[in-house]
Amino acid sequence: MSKVNNSFFALSEYCKKENYKGWDPYDGLNSQVFSVLPFKKWDLARLAWIQGFKRSPINFRKLLMVPKQYNAKGIGLFLSGYCNLYHLAKDGNESFGSIDELETKINELASLLISLKSEGYSGACWGYNFDWQARRLFLFPSHTPTVVATTFCATALFEAYEVTKNQTYLQTALSSAKFITEDLSRTEDQDGIMFSYSPLNGNNTVYNASLLGAKLLSLCYRYTKEEQLKKLAQKAVLTACKGQEKDGSWVYGLLPIQSWKDSFHTGYNLDAIKTYQNETGDVSFDKYLNLGFEYYINNFFEPDGTPKYYHNKTYPIDIHCPGQLFVTLSSCNTFKQYRGLADKVLNWTIANMQDKKGYFYYQLKKGVSSKISYMRWSNAFMFNAMSYYLLEQENSINGI
């Protein structure tokens, strides 16, 4: 078995053993200890508590009674990964399960994902299993739906439908369009719009969040052919492309404190624009996509495969940075062209960011790094990312 297969098998077995439950970098407010302290209603205390958990290389979660839980986005990522493994098995490679075994797992995870929906909104939507204090500006209560989590989850259900033809998966995913169109606010921009991050005020002008909304509407359009969905998606893509800088880069968002440029959110942007083009047939944004892709490839990876977080500095190296590369190369149909880079990045990541127990680390820093296992952020993300690598590798072997 190859080094990559061994790595993926170890990750898969670890996640199965944990039953896909785990901790998260941002789950500090789930602490049963914190919940009985008097300062739980103080925004600065909540922020400090979350950041303490997130930044500490020592895991205090057991001591402070933070339970391992399901995270909807994490389950969505696992579901998407298993759909890729199903297609791998259909192509004749059953290294990670037979067709029947993988279909059973897909049904299991799809049902679980539907059970994790946030209730009380216009359509199917998903959030995170913890309260989240974002700076002092706003508090997202647990299970507040976000466009990011919803897009990952609905996309996974579309993929599960394509495998199983289960109408429940399709109809649930399609209903998420109403969440995008009716529950999210919009920032108008002449001919375009930006979708907000969530129904709550805050993070209203983030490029990747708005583009993920466009991606989801585009996927819904594939099945419904509702022109309004295509038009709204087009407006969101238009605004994002207008916001692209001359060198092909994007800042994270429009607020002054959101002016950084990072690797994996750039990958999200590219994936969303490409999906919009694939599903609608509108290729009028192709030049922006190509320019953004060139910037992404040329600015976020070192020659030896080291994945950079920012365009102008390497650390901290977040596990999303290598993982998103394989998804972006696959979605942009450039995996064969950049197979050498993909191999270098994956080999570097396995060597430097995978624990002997099979899980992947959250971030590497210049100093002391956190080697805590985070199910959604690290393991689910890499499970899905590596499934893309394995599927593309199989396609290359089969000459596809």
Image (cartoon, rainbow, N blue to C red):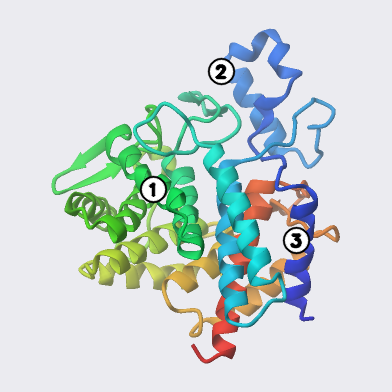
- 400 to the left or right of 35: left
Residue at point 79%, 26% (across, down)? 65
Residue linked to disc 2: 43
The amino acid marked with disc number 2 is Asp
Which mark is first along the chain, 2 or 3? 3
Residue on which the image places disc 1: 171
Q: What numbered label is drawn on residue 11?
A: 3
Left or right? Give the position of 356 relative to 236.
Answer: right
Q: Secondary structure at mark 1?
A: helix
Q: Secondary structure under badge 3?
A: helix
Q: Could you tell me the amino acid type at mark 3? A: Leu
The residue lying toward the viewer, choosing from 259 and 336, is: 336
Which label sits on residue 204?
A: none
Helix, strand or loop for disc 2: helix
Res. 171 visible in picture: yes
Q: Which image quarter holds the N terminus?
A: bottom right
Q: What type is the residue that disc 1 sits on?
A: Gln
Mark closest to the chain's N terminus, 1 or 2: 2
